[in-house]
């Protein structure tokens, strides 16, 4: 890839980045299939919320994405803070945290054209996202679940694993679909961050990643 193409991937990934979540009960056999640096593809739409409280179930997907679309204003249940990420989206597993029977799987939403970069390198900014994820996980262990996210219709909507079916089969096999790209012990890539464009007017309750990370 050219430098311009790489920068376009960085801007697409990190520009306007925000953090969302979904909680569900997930069998430990399925949880154990997730490993750091794994690349996933979700066939369907990914339903998440911008409201982050204590963990309501045994597993949480914490998702850093610049592609989430806010549906809460159109929803009959705006209290859910419903965000949807398009179908066919790709994710990189950045980190997995476990404590007291709870697991948090941190995912970074990446563009398809960036799979080669993210599968073979660790971008510097990923470390900052991981640290923010750990902070959120620690806070969630000390907090109660938000009551509005315990509603049956929300829990049913978000009860499915991301990137795999309910039998634990991943929707993509990187060796078959990405030119035999490994899920490596990633080498560090010192790719410069040229201040990607941020959201100008994020929702008040939505966690804008860059604002939260740098205290702006």
Image (cartoon, rainbow, N blue to C red):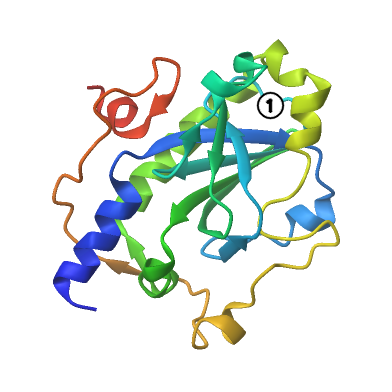
As drawn, is 74 to the left or to the right of 199?
right
Q: Secondary structure at mark 1?
A: loop
Observer-nearest residue: 191 or 7?
Answer: 7
Q: Position of residue 177 (x, y in %)?
A: 57, 82
| Labels in figure, total | 1
As drawn, is 112 to the left or to the right of 123?
right
Visible in this render: residue 92?
yes
Please tell me which residue is depicted at 22% across the width and 70% down the height of the picture: 5
Image quadrant assignment for residue 30: bottom right
Visible in this render: residue 58?
no
As drawn, is 54 to the left or to the right of 71?
right
Q: Is residue 194 above or below residue 212?
A: below
Q: How crowded is the residue under tag 1: few (<14 C-alpha within 10 Å), some, or many (20+)?
A: many
Please tell me which residue is depicted at 80% across the width and 26% down the height of the picture: 153
Q: Position of residue 18 (x, y in %)?
A: 40, 35
Observer-nearest residue: 167 or 156?
Answer: 156
Q: Quadrant of the N terminus?
A: bottom left
Image quadrant assignment for residue 22: top right
Please tell me which residue is depicted at 39% across the width and 15% down the height of the picture: 204
Q: Quadrant of the C terminus?
A: top left
Query: Disc 1 designates what residue?
Result: 55
Q: Position of residue 116 (x, y in %)?
A: 40, 75
Please tell me which residue is depicted at 78% across the width and 18% down the height of the picture: 151
Q: Is residue 153 above or below residue 87?
A: above
């Amino acid at each position: 890839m050219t430098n311009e193409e790489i920068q376009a991937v960085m801007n697409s990934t990190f520009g306007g980045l925000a953090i969302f979540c979904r909680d569900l009960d997930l069998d430990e056999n399925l949880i154990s299939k997730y490993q750091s640096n794994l690349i996933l593809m979700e066939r369907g739409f990914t339903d998440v919320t911008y409201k982050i409280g204590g963990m309501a179930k045994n597993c949480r997907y914490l998702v850093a994405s610049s592609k989430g679309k806010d549906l809460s204003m159109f929803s009959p249940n705006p209290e859910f803070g419903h965000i949807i990420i398009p179908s066919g989206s790709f994710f990189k597993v950045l980190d997995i945290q476990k404590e007291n029977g709870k697991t948090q799987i941190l995912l970074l939403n990446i563009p398809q054209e960036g799979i080669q970069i993210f599968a073979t390198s660790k971008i510097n900014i990923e470390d900052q996202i991981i640290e923010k994820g750990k902070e959120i996980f620690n806070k969630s262990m000390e907090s109660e679940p938000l009551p509005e996210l315990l509603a049956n219709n929300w829990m049913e909507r978000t009860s499915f694993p991301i990137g795999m079916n309910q039998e634990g089969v991943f929707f993509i096999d990187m060796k078959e679909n990405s030119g035999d790209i490994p899920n490596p012990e990633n080498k560090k890539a010192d790719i410069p961050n040229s201040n990607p464009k941020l959201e100008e007017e994020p929702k008040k309750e939505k966690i804008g990643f860059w604002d939260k990370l740098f205290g702006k």
